[in-house]
Image (tube, grey):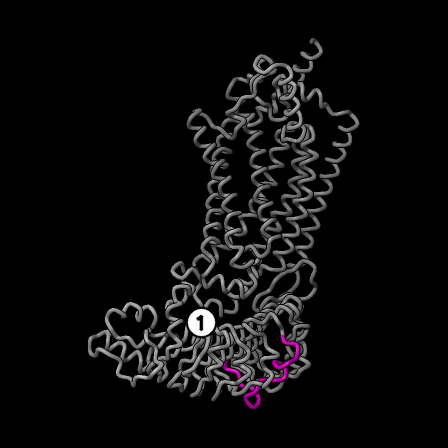
Amino acid sequence: MRARSSQVEALRGTETETTAFSPTVLALCWCCFVTLHTFCLLYFASVAWFYWHLAGTSLDRWLFTYSLGLGPEFDRIIAAAHACVGGIHFGYLLWMVMWSLKERQLVFAVYDVFVKADAHEAKKQFGSSITDFVRGILAKIVIVGVDGPYFDVILLGREIVEAALQTQQAYRMSLLLPRAELNRCYSALLVLNCWATALVETAFHENATKRRFFAIVCDCTLDLVTSVGVSVVLISIYFPDYDFRINDFPERKWYEDVWLVHAISEFKVLLVTSLGDLIMRMIYALSMLINMNNMKKLLSTTSSTTGTNLKVNHRVAAVVPLTRIMADVHLAFKLPSKLEMVIASVQRLSRLLFSAWGIVVLVLHLYAESIPGILQCGMQIKPWFNSKPSCSLLLLDCYGSNFVGNEDEITAQWSSVDPDTVACLVVRHCPNLEVSDKLTEFSGLKILKFYNSTITNWSKRAAISQVHHPNLIMLFLVRVNMTNGELPAGLNGDNFPRTLRDIECCNTNLHTLPEDFDLKWPQSASMYLEACNFTEVPPSLARLRPFDLSLAYNPISHLPATLFEGGIVYLHIGGTSVSELPENVNDVLPLVQLRVDNTDVAFFWNWIDPMVDHKAAVLSIIPYTVVASHTPYCQELQRIYQGEQTNFAALYHKDQSLILSNASTENWSILKNAVSCDEWPKTWYPIHFEDVYSGIK
């Protein structure tokens, strides 16, 4: 008994560690925890709400187009995961506030509320066997918990793993984020965290409570920035552009080169792009919660001892427990002297390791920052290991560079950058464009745009293909002239990129497509051939079966029935010379919207009635089945609404639509929901915005 009493008294000598924090510091820490839980609750709840309502919006379609998400089927899984984390923060917040009000003192966690009974009380209530069982459980908790003898070793292992993951995140951000300030801040925080680990080990070597507390603070800070901070900064950047009425950004933003490349890169950091990404986000979030819980445990012990005149026999100590049970546990698990020496050596090694780690990250970042930029780079990134200028958006402006666009000039311009980093390539104002075979080196290319140029030579050597451009998503040809009005060889290769989902041609001289066009170009893509010179619908285009098709403002007077039967979902034939739709069309249901505005269409056949009936199942972003503004049909419909006539005056046809030809007042609600006679943009491609954005300044 005397030996045990002396051992307990020795343990009591460590109580100065538990009184290391003043009441003012404790109050400040309590306020910080409440603020942090509130902030994280709002963030994770907002993310959960966003993903819960994402499915079925036009934003979800844009994200799918650019491969920036897992798809609609995973949206609510992601929402549920974030809601769970937000719920944990809400539980901690509620606990701290309610128990603090009840106890009339600052309560950090359960350690402030449930007092562990001493050995005598436990034995009295449950018997010696129960006491031994409880002591055994407590022993297992103590040796791995924040107040256990092995916590420093466990913390070191965790810090190494987290530092490796956060270093990988810093490298990923250097590849993706063009905003230099964000990369600098994160890299600086990572370096400071590495060095802080070494400094904390040195400064508080003799004080386990403070050493562990400040080490956890450093880890928690970087976890917070990684899991929440970077995302919040990016949200604050994009929030002003977001339109909550349509749950999307304005459509023109998706055609703004700089904004789009920013979004493609930064949404990979902001949004969940894979199941692995979701798991890593949850790991960071839960790691932050564990760190916060450990800090609370240390502070709870401190607040308990300072608030009760150090009645240590009824409280849990931060590092060395002072109840009889805890004292016995620590005596039972007292570290052998050799193991203590090993742990001390490991701690010294960790100081050297993290100091060197921070230096390596700093050197890599400074080296990347030292790479100079180039004039034609519209958006520069700073990957750590690249020795050439890296450019997400490569902009070739023949007018601004004072050349015509021959192959040698193009090659010289494109050779000055690292081709693997180019995500978007834009060519403007080239009167004699000869596409260089350097184009085949841009393996990471996602967007290819030509504006206000004349393509005189685009050979098969420079063709876009699945081999050289496996990530190409979008192709734009705007105000472009091509030789003989035909696709150049570079756009008619045998191995066209299978990832190409959006091909948009607007105001070109294109008037024909190859007969085997449907065998080369991808099916189920978006295809806009607007304001071109087509006089008929190419048979290969009808066989291609695009997801949405626009032939607006082409001099086409006849439409084949196969065009409507090919599985097209959205069809725009406005501004053409069409006066009547084909009479016999089978299986039109995949079509959910038909635009015939600015044509001479005066009536509709009955094959359109299933589309009107099916409107209830259409996405909310499609408010009308038929857009018929500035047509004879809408002119009559407006007169009917105004009471100037009671029926459609157009000649009645046998198989005419029963729904859209019914002018009775009982049918007006259906007509108003199905047919739009309002003004709509003439083309799907925002040509007027493009002219302002990309025109010669």
Q: Is residue 331 left or right of residue 313?
A: right
Name the residue: 52% across, 75% down: 546
| Secondary-structure class at tag 1 | loop
Quadrant of image for the N terminus? top right
In the displayed orientation, state which residue is furthest to the right: 338
In this view of the protein, which residue sits in the foreground, 446 or 511?
511
Q: Amino acid at mark 1?
A: Leu
Segment tinted magenta in the rendering: 478-496
Give the total number of marks visible in the rendering: 1
Crowd tier of the residue under label 1, counting other residues whose Cα lies within 10 Å: few below 14, some 14–19, many 20 or above = some
Residue 692 visible somewhere in the drawing: no
Q: Is residue 411 left or right of residue 180?
A: right
Image coordinates for residue 673, horizontal then vertical, percent: 33, 68
In the displayed orientation, state which residue is furthest to the bottom: 484
In this view of the protein, which residue sits in the foreground, 315 or 429?
315
Image coordinates for residue 180, horizontal then vertical, percent: 58, 58
Q: Is residue 591 magenta?
A: no
Image coordinates for residue 294, horizontal then vertical, percent: 59, 33
Name the residue: 69% across, 81% down: 461
Q: Is residue 489 magenta?
A: yes
For residue 269, which quarter of the picture? bottom right
**As displayed, is residue 475 above or below residue 3?**
below
For residue 136, which quarter of the picture? top right
Q: Is residue 624 left or right of residue 445?
A: left
Q: Write down the residue under mark 1.
A: 589
Image coordinates for residue 137, horizontal then vertical, percent: 64, 25
